[in-house]
Image (cartoon, grey):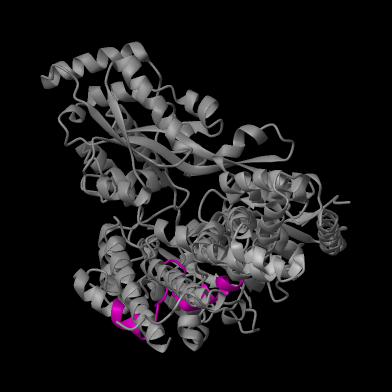
């Protein structure tokens, strides 16, 4: 009996090697200097209907198979795409776009009507677009979206097939960049109507006007992009095929990478320490700020000196160098890669945050005296339940105890539950984060105005409100930049919020993959001019 | 028999209704809404979209609507996966999960029965000792640990089988193997224990005394009796396989439906939570039902009709 079993086992093993061998040979044949890129995405794309997409996986695909008026280039600056040219009025509130001769993948021309239709569709309350607010800079957009205005009053009009006129509510310097965002992509009315609820659910139920077309989509398993023959700038598109594997587990992705099944993997926090010295690493700096927000309705945190003491008690470089081992310590609210008036905002605004335990102790005592508080109350810190955040929260708790002598209890909550308590103002201190929607400091700054929906701690400063309001409607972009710099200074001096660090991600990418552009806003990647070189 | 089946079917429906109701209200007690960019959407827009979805209606109203749709077999559309039908999504994922579960089950039961029988017949031999060690490991080591080890050693270090992915039979070997360990462990222990007991029974001696050969005695008289307890645990085992495949599917990147569980709960995708829960509950209730019927087939002593009162 024993012998027979061993025989059976041997046979099983033999059979499996043969089968595995077949798979291996097939994979190998695809190599060579063919322009094929193998990439990973973290989940099934939830929706490629650009009017309602909200997630970065969908944005990544849309950015490569579709194209808006402008597209972000290698330096993350907007460059003309579907638009050939734009005329901006003196008050910077009217944009007249002239479209180039571009075609949809079915051969029909891309017209100004496709833009007007798509934008109004996203704003139509019936579309239930969760990102509709990104169109609010357009005159009348918010009113229509909130069912308080008409579609006719929205400031977007196709004058003729090639001319699109857009009127803005306020003069904003970042509008051209916004036209590269997914919600601003054109759509063809006949196709949307034809497929109804099935629109964009499969590759043949949508149209493409970008560098690639989606050629295959096996739901929850994989999808594939192929070069678009009808693309206006196809000379600059070098890749023939991009294969995406949907891979949720980082460890699985790493295995794919190490066995050559993928040319790329995005590493989760747990893998950073192990791979940070790997030769293929690429650091992807997000435009995200993580911060401590204080509930200023609490007597304790209504005092600016106490807030400052909490901010000064934390050595931010410990978080980025020792704990998460990646990311940049915050010097202010706005991340280093955000620009204003063509310059880095951080360079203009400088450094506002420092670690000073002695000063922190002093400030706490002064602040408590001012408020007539004898002994610091027990503080509860609302925290994230992620593996990345837990040690960071522990570190902060330890610092508050060590430096300030204040007991802080960490309340770890699932994301949605934490959000609910923050929205209800049911917290004292909370650890939170915000990512940019567009390349302008305003995306981080308008939220702290008095009464703002995301100003959960109800911090309020008249001077700050005034400056932001002025900046929002200032057509002089140089002066506007100065106003924003001044506003950030107020927010930091008053410590309405205590920024901690800007997040970054570690990725592995094979050295033969060239020219993949990474964007800190909207979509993560552009493959338009990417190519393969030197893969044996 | 007929009455028994009908009675069990009615119980099945009641069980499913209780599960549906419980899950529905528990799910709605989760904080937050199914909106995906909930942390960024302006509050006014949020309210308006919830209104459009009917999520601002009183809970009983939503419940009645949900139950009405469920009775008609309509599981609705996903919130997160813009408008995709839940039924279609389940049907896309189920074949892979089912294949995995089935392969693990068949392999596990075959190996388990064989190992259990041999261990009982050769008590104290190396096969017996080896199978004991294997069983302890199978019980103690979770399937996802095995999965990660297999994927790394067999896939990356030795390069014999694909590290992950789905498509060919080769892709399904490692995940099935990781899942089957628990089956092997349980079946082996049950069969061995039961076989030892059966071997000592008088009827076994009688059978031998009749002059039947050893093979017939062991298989026809011994194994058949020893299998009854093993069948009992097939129901719960099926469930363990289905739920256990959740993480294994992720590690091997299999487009099954295990991910839907976690994903839908994390994002409050109400329709998907209900759809997946109802689907799994149905499978579970069905598997228990089948096991009940199987008893009668394997062991004629178990009557499916109650004796006359």
Q: Is residue A114 above or below residue B134?
A: below
Judging depth in this view, the residue of B148 and B223 nearest the camera is B223
* Residue B80 in magenta stretch: yes
Locate residue B7 relative to residue A376 in the image: left or right.
right
On the image, the x and y values in percent for residue B140 come to: 57, 44
Where does the magenta region start and end? B66-95
Q: Is residue A246 visible in this depiction of the protein?
A: yes
Looking at the picture, does residue B113 appear above or below residue A190? above
Q: Is residue A479 magenta?
A: no
- The N terminus of chain B lies in which quarter of the figure? bottom left
Between A158 and A318, the one nearer to me in the picture:
A318
User: Of A314 and A459, which appears nearest the observer?
Assistant: A314
Pinpoint residue A419: horizontal percent, then vertical percent.
Answer: 31, 49
x, y (%) of residue A366? 20, 15
Quadrant for residue B34, please give it.
bottom left
**Residue B57 in sight:** no
């Amino acid at each position: 009996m024993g012998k027979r079993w061993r025989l059976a086992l041997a046979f099983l093993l033999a059979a499996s090697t043969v089968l595995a061998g077949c798979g291996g040979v097939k994979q190998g044949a695809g190599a060579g200097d063919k322009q094929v890129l193998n990439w990973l995405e973290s989940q099934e794309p939830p929706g490629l209907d650009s009017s309602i997409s909200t997630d970065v996986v969908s944005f990544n695909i849309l950015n490569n198979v579709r194209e808006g008026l402008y597209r972000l280039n290698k330096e993350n600056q907007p460059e003309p795409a579907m638009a050939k040219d734009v005329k901006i009025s003196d008050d910077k509130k009217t944009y007249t776009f002239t479209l180039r001769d571009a075609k949809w993948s079915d051969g029909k021309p891309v017209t100004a009507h496709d833009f007007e239709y798509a934008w109004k569709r996203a704003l139509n309350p019936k579309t239930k677009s969760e990102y509709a607010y990104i169109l609010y800079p357009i005159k009348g957009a918010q009113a229509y979206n909130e069912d308080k205005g008409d579609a006719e009053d929205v400031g977007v009009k196709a004058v003729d097939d090639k001319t699109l006129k857009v009127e803005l509510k306020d003069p904003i310097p970042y509008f051209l960049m916004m036209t590269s965002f997914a919600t601003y992509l054109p759509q063809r009315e006949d196709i949307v109507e034809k497929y109804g609820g099935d629109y964009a659910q499969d590759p043949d139920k949508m149209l493409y006007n970008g560098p690639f077309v989606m050629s295959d989509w096996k739901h929850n398993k994989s999808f594939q992009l192929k070069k678009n023959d009808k693309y206006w700038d196809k000379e600059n598109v070098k890749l023939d095929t991009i294969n995406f594997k949907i891979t949720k587990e980082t460890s699985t992705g790493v295995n794919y990478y190490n066995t050559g099944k993928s040319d790329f993997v995005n590493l989760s926090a747990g893998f950073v320490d192990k791979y940070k010295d790997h030769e293929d690493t690429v650091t992807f700096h997000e435009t995200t700020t993580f911060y401590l927000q204080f509930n200023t309705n609490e007597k304790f945190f209504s005092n600016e000196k106490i807030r400052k003491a909490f901010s000064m008690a934390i050595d931010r470089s410990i978080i980025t160098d020792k704990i998460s081992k990646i990311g940049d310590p915050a010097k202010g609210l706005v991340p280093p890669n955000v620009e204003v008036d063509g310059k880095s905002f951080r360079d203009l605004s400088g450094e506002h945050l420092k670690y000073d335990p002695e000063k922190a102790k002093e400030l706490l005592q002064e602040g408590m005296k001012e408020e007539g508080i004898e002994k610091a109350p027990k503080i509860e810190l609302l925290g994230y339940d992620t593996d990345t955040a837990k040690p960071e929260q522990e570190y902060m708790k330890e610092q508050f105890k060590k430096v300030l002598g204040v007991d802080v209890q960490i309340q770890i909550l699932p994301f949605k539950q934490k959000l609910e308590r923050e929205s209800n103002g049911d917290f004292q201190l909370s650890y939170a984060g915000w990512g940019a929607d567009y390349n302008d400091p305003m995306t981080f700054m308008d939220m702290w105005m008095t009464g703002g929906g995301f100003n959960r701690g109800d911090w309020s400063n008249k001077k700050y409100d005034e400056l932001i309001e002025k900046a929002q409607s200032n057509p002089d972009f140089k002066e506007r930049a100065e106003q924003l710099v001044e506003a950030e200074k107020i927010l930091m001096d008053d410590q309405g919020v205590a920024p901690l660090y800007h997040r970054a991600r570690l990725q592995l990418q094979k050295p033969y993959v060239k020219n993949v552009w990474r964007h800190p806003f909207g979509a993560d990647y552009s493959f338009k001019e990417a190519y393969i070189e030197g893969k044996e | 028999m007929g009455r028994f089946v009908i009675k069990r079917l009615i119980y099945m429906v009641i069980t499913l209704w209780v599960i549906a109701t419980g899950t529905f209200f528990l799910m709605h007690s989760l904080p937050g809404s199914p909106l995906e960019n909930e942390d960024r959407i302006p509050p006014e827009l949020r309210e308006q979209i919830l209104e459009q979805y009917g999520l601002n209606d009183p809970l009983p109203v939503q419940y009645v609507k949900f139950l009405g749709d469920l009775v008609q077999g309509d599981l609705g559309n996903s919130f997160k996966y813009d408008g995709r039908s839940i039924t279609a999504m389940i049907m896309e994922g189920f074949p892979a999960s089912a294949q995995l579960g089935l392969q693990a089950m068949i392999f596990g039961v075959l190996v388990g029965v064989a190992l259990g029988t041999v261990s009982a017949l050769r008590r104290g031999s190396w096969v017996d000792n080896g199978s004991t060690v294997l069983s302890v490991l199978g019980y103690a080591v979770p399937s996802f640990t095995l999965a990660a080890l297999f994927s790394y050693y067999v896939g990356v270090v030795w390069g014999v089988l694909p590290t992950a992915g789905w498509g060919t039979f080769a892709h399904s070997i490692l995940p099935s193997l990781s899942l089957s360990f628990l089956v092997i462990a349980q079946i082996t222990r049950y069969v061995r224990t039961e076989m030892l007991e059966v071997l000592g029974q008088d009827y076994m001696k009688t059978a031998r005394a009749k002059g039947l050969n050893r093979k017939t005695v062991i298989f026809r008289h011994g194994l058949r009796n020893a299998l009854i307890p093993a069948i009992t645990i097939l129901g719960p085992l099926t469930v363990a396989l289905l739920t256990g495949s959740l993480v294994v599917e992720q590690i091997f990147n299999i487009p099954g439906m295990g991910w839907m569980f976690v994903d839908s709960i994390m994002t409050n995708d109400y329709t998907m939570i209900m759809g997946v829960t109802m689907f799994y509950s149905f499978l579970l209730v069905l598997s228990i039902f089948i096991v009940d019927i199987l008893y009668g087939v394997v062991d004629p002593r178990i009557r499916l009709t109650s004796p006359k009162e």
